[in-house]
Image (cartoon, rainbow, N blue to C red):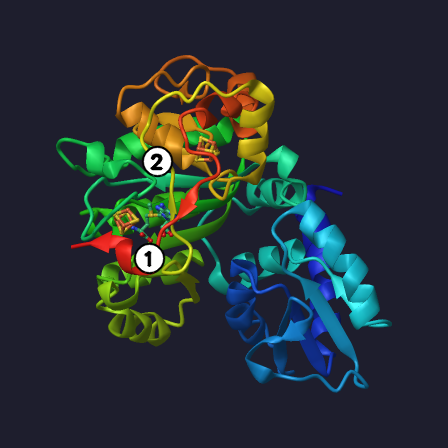
């Protein structure tokens, strides 16, 4: 069977099972759960959908557990889902347990009807359960313009002398070069503030067309309301929004949420006000490799591969270092020049990231929420 046939076949039996359940439990309060809260009803699931996280149901929900339950593991990483599976067997003994990838494929192809080659998309989705096969999360900085100036913004946009949008065609050409080597599980379209990008709807449509991309997320800071064009593009492409919570600075949060609800677009609130790190001044601290590797392993920012101005780098701070003209050792792939899959793998596997960690304070300081942001 081809990947497309495998997924269609699995989807038919999984959705049958989910539809006949008395309760559906989304295990893990992740962005995948956010998508499924909207996706499942549109797939014809009538049963109550509960979210279970950290040993409890969220928002005071409770389950009868005597009924037929189906659990969907919403962890993004393989290891997370394996751990979930163990605890799931304790909490929901006897319930059917499913992964999310097949159901997601069914949703994107039968409800959203994303405009892309479904046979190639099926190949991407089948690779996604093991993050070694993909770029797990690719944060794309599409504009360096922003409506806020957060102290210690990790992207280094403040160091860009002339904030600008990345041209759409150039971004597309560069992104296609990356996905030709390695598919992307979750692409995060962001800035700066990405809603300021003049041709943002086109970027959303272009990403949706690329079958080497699984999930599409837009990260925004809650200061702007997306235009109808952006909402239509997001809806047609199965995109979800992640809204950073900057307290009073996210001035348009309510109207933004209203607009997204109007278009039935999934969104999640990303609490940022309490967890804000400062990496310190950028200079080499002279720590040994072992300590710097330990620093990388514990770092909040380690996990996002960043794509900025044609360069792929292994973390946000490396992007800042690049913008500041620091030595990034072999932690950047320039997709405008010749590169091989092995180069992308090296950055994606964070083989040399420890060298960059020497630029950061270790341990990092968590800044008081009140001191985080300036206007
Ligand atoms: C650079 S922002 C771009 C998207 C958008 N402007 C926003 O702020 O949500 C991407 C994410 O990085 C987070 N971030 C940036 N600097 C950070 C820091 N120093 N500590 C913790 N999170 C940070 C932001 O909260 C946001 O969720
Ligand atoms: S809103 Fe986002 S991109 Fe803009 S300065 Fe703050 S963290 Fe950086
Ligand atoms: S360079 Fe290392 S310590 Fe600094 S932000 Fe990146 S992963 Fe974290």
Residue 362 x, y percent position in the rendering? 47, 34
Instruction: Decide if residue 141 is in sight here.
Output: yes
Instruction: In the rendered view, tell whether residue 108 sits above or below residue 188.
Output: below
| Image quadrant in which you'd find residue 123 | top right
Give residue 48's quadrant in the image: bottom right
Identified at 21% across, 47% down, the residue is: 197
Q: Is residue 231 above or below residue 138?
A: below
Label 2 CB less than 8 angstroms from ligand 3:
no
Q: Which mark is on residue 286?
A: none
Q: Is residue 317 above or below residue 37?
A: above
Q: Is residue 305 left or right of residue 371?
A: right
Question: Which residue ends up furthest to the right in the rendered image?
Answer: 94
Q: Which residue is mark 1?
A: 233
Q: Which residue is mark 2?
A: 280
Q: Nearer the viewer, residue 289 or 140?
A: 289
Query: Around disc 2, counting alpha carbons within 10 Å, would you say few (fewer than 14), some (14 to 19), or many (20 or more)?
Result: some
Secondary structure beneath label 2: loop
Is residue 5 in view from this perspective? no
Quadrant in which the N terminus appears? top right
Count of numbered labels shown in the rendering: 2
Circle 1: element type: helix
Residue 32 location, quadrant? bottom right
């Amino acid at each position: 069977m081809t990947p497309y046939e495998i997924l269609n076949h699995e989807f038919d039996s999984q959705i049958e099972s989910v539809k006949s359940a008395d309760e559906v439990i989304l295990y893990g309060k992740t962005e995948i759960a956010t998508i499924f809260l909207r996706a499942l009803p549109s797939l014809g699931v009538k049963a109550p959908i509960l979210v279970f996280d950290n040993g409890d149901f969220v928002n005071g929900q409770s389950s009868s557990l005597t009924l037929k339950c189906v659990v969907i593991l919403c962890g993004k990483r393989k290891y997370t889902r394996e751990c979930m599976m163990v605890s799931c067997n304790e909490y929901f003994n006897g319930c059917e347990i499913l992964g999310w990838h097949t159901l997601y494929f069914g949703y994107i192809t039968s409800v959203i009807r994303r405009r892309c080659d479904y046979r190639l998309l099926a190949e991407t989705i089948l690779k996604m359960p093991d993050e070694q096969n993909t770029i797990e999360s690719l944060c794309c900085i599409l504009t360096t313009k922003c409506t806020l100036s957060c102290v210690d913004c990790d992207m280094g946009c403040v160091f860009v002398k002339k904030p600008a949008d990345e041209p759409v065609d150039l971004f597309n050409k560069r992104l296609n070069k990356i996905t030709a080597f390695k598919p992307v599980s979750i692409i995060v379209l962001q800035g700066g503030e990405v809603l300021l990008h003049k041709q943002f709807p086109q970027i959303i449509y272009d990403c949706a067309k690329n079958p080497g991309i699984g999930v599409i997320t837009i990260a925004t800071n809650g200061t702007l309301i997306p235009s109808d064009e952006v909402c239509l593009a997001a809806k047609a492409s199965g995109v979800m929004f992640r809204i950073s919570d900057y307290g009073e600075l996210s001035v348009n949060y309510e109207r933004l949420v209203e607009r997204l609800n109007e278009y039935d677009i999934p969104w999640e609130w990303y609490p940022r006000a309490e967890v804000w790190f400062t990496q310190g001044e950028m200079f080499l601290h002279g720590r040994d490799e072992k300590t710097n590797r330990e620093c990388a392993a514990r770092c909040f920012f380690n996990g996002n591969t960043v794509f900025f101005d044609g360069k792929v780098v292994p973390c946000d701070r490396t992007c800042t270092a690049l913008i500041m003209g620091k030595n990034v050792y072999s932690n950047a792939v320039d997709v405008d020049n010749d590169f091989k899959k092995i180069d992308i793998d090296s950055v994606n596997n964070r083989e040399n990231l420890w060298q960059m960690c020497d630029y950061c304070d270790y341990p990092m300081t968590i800044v008081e929420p009140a001191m985080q942001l300036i206007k």
